[in-house]
Image (spheres, grey):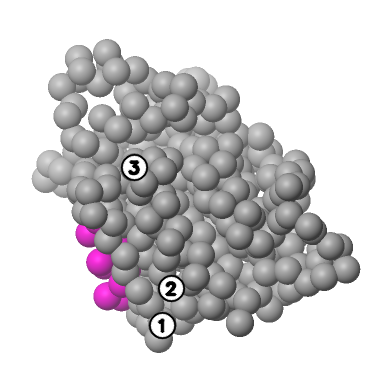
Amino acid sequence: MTQQHSVTFRNRTWDVAATLRLPEGFDADRKYAAIVCAHPISSCKEQTSGAIYGRRLTEAGFVTLAFDASTQGASGGEPRFSEDPATRVEDFRCTVDYLVTLPYVDEERIGVLGVCGGGGYAVSAAMTDRRFKAVGTVVAANYGRIMREGDMTPDAALKTLDAIARQRTAEARGAEPLIVGYIPDSEDARAKAGIDDIDIVEAVQYYTTPRGRQPGSPNRLRFTSTAPALGWDAFHLAEALLTQPLHIVIGDRPGGFGSYRDGFDLFNRARSGQKTLQVVEGASHYDLYDKPEATGKALERLLPFFRKHLCA
């Protein structure tokens, strides 16, 4: 059987919480390839990144490390419920700092797999941390683009920045922090809001029902923390700095989060000499979180990709 351990490592002055999985027949005297597994925005390590992809990669023989983003889930860091790209990317560098201290991890065979927003962050991290030797993404989404597009109205980004500015001023003068939700907090709330985009519909079905609900994923976002994301691009300089082998997985049922077009954008921009784009037919963004048929197809390509580039 595989082993599962709760561990922590440091990012700056706080602890980041993670689940370390060890493969069946684990031998501490051997050297193993390791894969960091990064959760979607608003998610946690107990959901798709750890429970689905981390588990399957470990069953295939890899050491895996699925972590909660700083200020979220079981991880420390302040202010709570922040979604700041610089901190999120630094989390990835800290995962490698932790893995290279483990005597059974081969520091030359560390990869990363990110899901949704975690995929965008994984790409950004790999561009500036050469210790990642292979990069896999599943429905990777460019959080900066999502924030800039907002509600798709003219000057949506400027309107958001103006609202953030007003809120920061209010909080500086003593107002309570504004904590909002990433998505409607129930099916009724979604229906009343008249939102019928497939990604929002399926996000509510995933996060607010027993299918995906977890305590570490409470649908809470500190509004003012999102300002840096509006000036950030997950794929910035990919044409120059992203050279590691890359495998991108997307579904062919596009929705408002834009992971379908982001997949093609990343593929076209990446400098990687060895890069592949897999389109899973009939799969939506959230099918690739936990639906066995869709995730199975993704793993049919991800497992040999990581074996080729981390185990050869």
In the rendered structure, the answer to whether residue 185 lies left or right of residue 48 reads left
Look at the picture and state if 33 lies above or below 291.
below
Disc 3 marks a residue whose amino acid type is Asp
Task: Give the residue furthest to the right.
Answer: 29
Whether residue 222 is visible here, answered yes or no, is yes
Q: Which residues are magenta?
A: 260-269
For the point 41% across and 82% down, which residue is it?
Answer: 274
Measured in 3D between alpha carbons, the distance from the residue under mark 2 to the one under mark 3, in whole angstroms, is 21 Å
Closer to the camera in the image, 236 or 161: 236
Where is residue 163 drawn, in percent x and y? 30, 34
Q: Nearer the viewer, mark 2 or mark 3?
A: 3
- Residue 246 circle label: 2
What secondary structure is the stretch in magenta mostly built from?
helix
Could you tell me which secondary element the residue under label 3 belongs to? helix
In this rendering, the answer to whether 194 lies above or below 74 is: above
Q: Is residue 262 magenta?
A: yes
Give the labeled residue for mark 1: 274
Q: Residues within 10 Å of mark 1 (few under 14, many from 20)?
A: few
- Residue drawn where x is 55% and y is 78% of the image: 309
Q: Provide residue 234's location: percent of width, then percent of height.
A: 39, 61
Q: Which residue is mark 3?
A: 287
Say whether residue 15 is visible: no
Q: On the rendered structure, is 150 left or right of 271?
A: left
- Residue 254 position (above or below residue 272): above
Work out whether mark 3 precedes mark 1 in sequence or the reverse, and give the earlier one.
Answer: 1
Q: Where is residue 263, by image quadrant? A: bottom left
Q: Is residue 104 magenta?
A: no
